[in-house]
Image (cartoon, grey):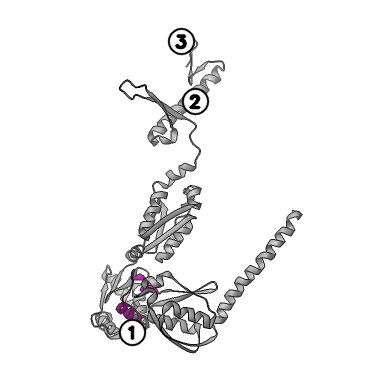
Amino acid sequence: MNTFKPFIAAVMLCLLPALSAAAQSAGDLQQNLDKSLSVTITDQPIRDVFDRLQRESGVKFVLDPDTFERLPWGEQTRLRISLKNITLRNALSPMLAPQCLQWTVEGAAIRVSPNEALFRMGRRASYEELQLLAKLATGKLNTPAGDNAAKIEALPDALRTLTQTPDLDLAVNLRQTREKSAAFERGFAALPCSPAAFLDALCGSEYAWYLNGQTLVVLPRKEQIERQLQQTVTLRYQNEKLSAVLLDLTRKARVPLSIEPGVMQLLPAETRSNFSLVMTDASIAQALEVISGSTGLKFTATDVGLSVETGKSAAANNAAERPRSAWMLQMDLDLGSGAQPVRITVRAEELPADLRDAIEARKNAYIQQLRDALVTDPTAPIDNGEIVPDDEDGGH
């Protein structure tokens, strides 16, 4: 044991500077977020804007690929900002809101990505849609007058006036009158707030909303999750852990992942730890279908996320890890036309399950027969797995 102490100490000494640097980087980020900043950038491509902010503030920015996939002109989307003696911590949210973007801290960097309303569209927004989403996110909606029925009646016009969109339509797909009434009561209780916050409150955990042109669509959350799984992606996983692949796919879809306990252990170890998948311009749902076909796992969209359960063939796949049966079946194939018969050998695991079970049962019966005979008479001769009778009346 003492022999290894200097080595362990050396390893720890090597790790400490790395851990310290990581902690220092995260600490530097927080400090830089709280520094006052003054900068004006006029009509520049989005990547150039954040490169400039990074140089001015020392804050590292990472632009999520979805940012370019959702904005009207991708990387050529242009921004203008004007910051005067304000910290980035206080400036980022109002600066990003008109572009329907959000920011999150990831270690020592800030990740910029589409907000939920922009992401839920499931495609690139038009310039007009982006403007409308921005008004929904930044405007202030007050409580309409009257009882609940009157408020519901007045709501579409209030939204049209606030967003300056005369043709704005609110398409609500709530199943029951009672459920619809409860949803609107929940939404009205959140007022005054932005129209986007009102819609979030109205939807609660059972529904979701997204913008399509000038229509605000409200639909069951399960259907929205299925829409998000239709997002097109290009994938390249090489010898990855299957669990990491599933987590990355659901992260791309922004869908919570729920794995049934013990499911992954039903798969062969090689599948769990060395999974490869390469797909170009395919939907996440299609990627899951491929994974299901190769693993037997079953993926189900629910109103809370994506559920991973045991498929019918998962247990069968696990059989590949079990020791092979210690017997083989030999048979002669008659090829006809005067050709010599061909003797072939088939392993037990190559046979259909019902036939294999029947042969196993017959084999076990022979073994029991041998056991009974040898216990009775250890000198009994055996030929080809059968007890050879000593005389016409004896034996088994």
**Mark-to-mark CA distance, 2 and 3:** 22 Å
Which residue lies under the disc numbered 1? 141
Q: Is residue 207 above or below residue 188?
A: above
Q: Please tell me which of labels 2 and 1 falls first in the chain.
A: 1
Q: Nearer the viewer, residue 127 or 185?
A: 127
Q: Main secondary structure of the magenta part?
A: helix
Which residue lies under the disc numbered 2? 367
x%, y% of residue 14? 67, 65
Return the mark for residue 393: 3
Residue displayed at 48% across by 84% down: 90
For the residues bearing labels 2 and 1, Cβ distance under 8 angstroms = no
x%, y% of residue 382? 51, 17
Residue displayed at 34% across by 62% down: 230
Callout 3: SS:
loop
The amino acid type of the residue labelled 2 equals Ile
The amino acid type of the residue labelled 3 equals Asp
Callout 2: SS:
helix
**Quick check: 45 left or right of 86?**
left
| 119 within the magenta span | yes
Q: Is residue 134 above or below residue 13?
A: below
x%, y% of residue 349? 44, 36
For the residues bearing labels 1 and 3, Cβ distance under 8 angstroms = no
**Mark-to-mark CA distance, 1 and 3:** 102 Å
Q: Please tell me which of labels 1 and 3 falls first in the chain.
A: 1
For the residues bearing labels 2 and 3, Cβ distance under 8 angstroms = no
| Boundaries of the magenta span | 115-134
The amino acid type of the residue labelled 1 equals Leu
